[in-house]
Image (cartoon, rainbow, N blue to C red):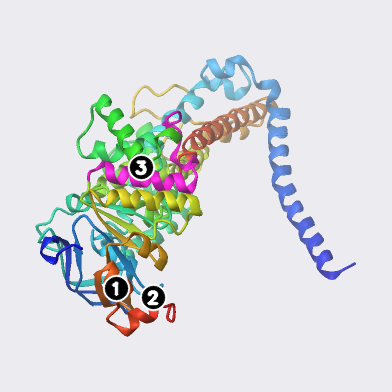
Amino acid sequence: MIKKSDIHIHIETKNLNVYYDNNYVLKNVNIEIPTKQLTAIIGPSGCGKTTLLKSFNRLLDLRDNIKTSGEILVDGENIFDSRVDVPDMRKKMGLLSQKPYPLPMSIYNNVAYGLRIHGKKNAKELDSAVKHYLQEAGLWNEVKDRLHDPASRLSVGQQQRLCLARAIAVEPEVVLCDEPTSALDPIAAQQIEKLLLKLKKEYTVVLVTHTLRQAKRLADHVVFLYFGKVVEQGPADEVFNNPKDPKTKAYIDGDIS
Amino acid sequence: MNRRILEEKIFKILMLASVFIVMGSLVIIIGLVVFNGGSSLTIEMFTQTSGGGYYLGRGGGILNAILGSLFLALPATALACLIGLGIALYLQREFTHPRISAFIRLSLDILWGIPSIVYGIFCLMIMVFIGIGTSLLAGIIALTLLEIPIITRYMDESIKMVSIELKEGAYSLGSTKFETAVKVVRRQALPGIIAGVLLGLGRGIGDAASILFTAGFSDRIPGSLFDSTAALPTMIYHLYASPYPLVRQRAYAAAFILVVIVLSISIVSRALSKRYTKFVIR
């Protein structure tokens, strides 16, 4: 059992509100995401899980008609502050999306891209770094003979692991995962789950998922979101075994979905 | 027979008829230029310029027009690409409010529909204003203006089609807007951009009306930007206006050369496009 005082908070939201067009998507969200643990954000479809996840690295900025208010503190620093260097802040947060979107280049360059834009240009260093991160993502053995093939030729499961490799290649502190196994077959999904368990030792992992069983298998910490509101949050065993809110209990029992 | 199956058959016949009209036209056009111009298609056509006697049936060639066409269309396309890329990037939501982009897109579509002769006349006004006569430079300006809307809209559409998830992937690696545009979006959009550039080049190299007043006509290969120049479309126009059947044959031969050039551009760009398409993420 982890004592509360041992937990460092990596990401914290304060009165976060998000409006999309005229929909009130996130309502006064106050959550804390602990460092180097796997936090699962659970809740029914359309409750704002993905919006919450994408607000952490300001990817919502890319979309039109979105209004945000409140604060998101990463390492104690508000990411909405005008002094924040947005690309630099985003570099700290890797992203694994629902459907893998590799970059339109070779397998090698998918991993090398992030390294290059952040200043690593030496060919030998790049080679060994690419190999290292592909190994970390459990993809090296499958692709070592065709590193210069287009990434689009890989299977969806391989593409997802490639996306993981490119994400950790820029040495983020957080890995944001948006239902990363929902487009994958069971075996590929299992590979990703194993990797996430490995990753949480070094990174803070935030996992959005709509499958409760996945959350139970992986999560240390759980946030339950229902119609844009945080109903309950806390250590996984407490939330799953001893929910305080009747809505959480209903969701866990499968009475609401 | 079942009514629905009959319906399907009728539509199939209609579709085939449409395809046949287009393919038939292509075959007839190529057949026509080869049949009529084949006998005039000599080595001299490619190696000699057209002296005054050429239009009366004496010896010579149309090297000045072939080179003139390339000198006009290639720089014009390059310029249109540069300007078009700037506009196309500006139109994206990262840089401009969608309402402003919509207005600019509408303007470009209107420009696309303006007849090329109008561009020619517009350019004539510019020439008078800056004080140059018919010249290679003026022709390049006219063709650039003609090609910009085509190339820009193609670039714009193919950049716009790049999915937001792909961009999110790039941004979450810490890319700046510029890096995302130049290193990621460009690769994804490249096949579409190449198609647009080809279309612009094809339009530019084949257009007669816009260069008629601007590039003028000359029997010599242009030596500088300020020399008048012939081009294949204007050459065809002058040759075909001749009363001599032999000279009119030469017009067909020139047309044949123009068709071959356009066809080669098409084949090359298709090959290029194919090379880049394999990297595109769907």
Q: Amino acid at mark 2?
A: Ile
Task: State the CA–CA distance, disc 1 to disc 3.
Answer: 30 Å
* Location of residue B81 (image quadrant): top left
Task: State the CA–CA distance, disc 2 to disc 1.
Answer: 9 Å
Please state the horizontal and vertical placement of residue A72, each as a whole percent of the image. 17, 66
> Which residue bears the numbered disc 3?
A137
> Which residue bears the numbered disc 2?
A252
Disc 3 element = loop
Determine if the magenta segment contains residue A209. Answer: no
Q: Amino acid at mark 1?
A: Val
Chain holding disc 1: A
Q: Amino acid at mark 3?
A: Ala
Residue at x-position 42% and y-position 30%:
A144
Q: State the extent of the magenta-drawn residues as a range.
A: A144-171
Please give the label number shown on residue A239. Answer: 1
* Callouts 2 and 1 close, C-beta under 8 Å: yes
Residue at x-position 72% and y-position 33%:
B31
Determine if the magenta segment contains residue A151. Answer: yes
Q: Quadrant of the C terminus of chain A?
A: bottom left
Chain holding disc 3: A
Task: State the CA–CA distance, disc 3 to disc 2.
Answer: 31 Å
Chain holding disc 2: A
Q: Residue furthest right?
A: B1
Please state the horizontal and vertical placement of residue B162, each as a whole percent of the image. 41, 52
2 or 1: tag closer to the N-terminus: 1
Q: Quadrant of the N terminus of chain A?
A: bottom left
Task: Specify whether A141 is left or right of A167.
Answer: right
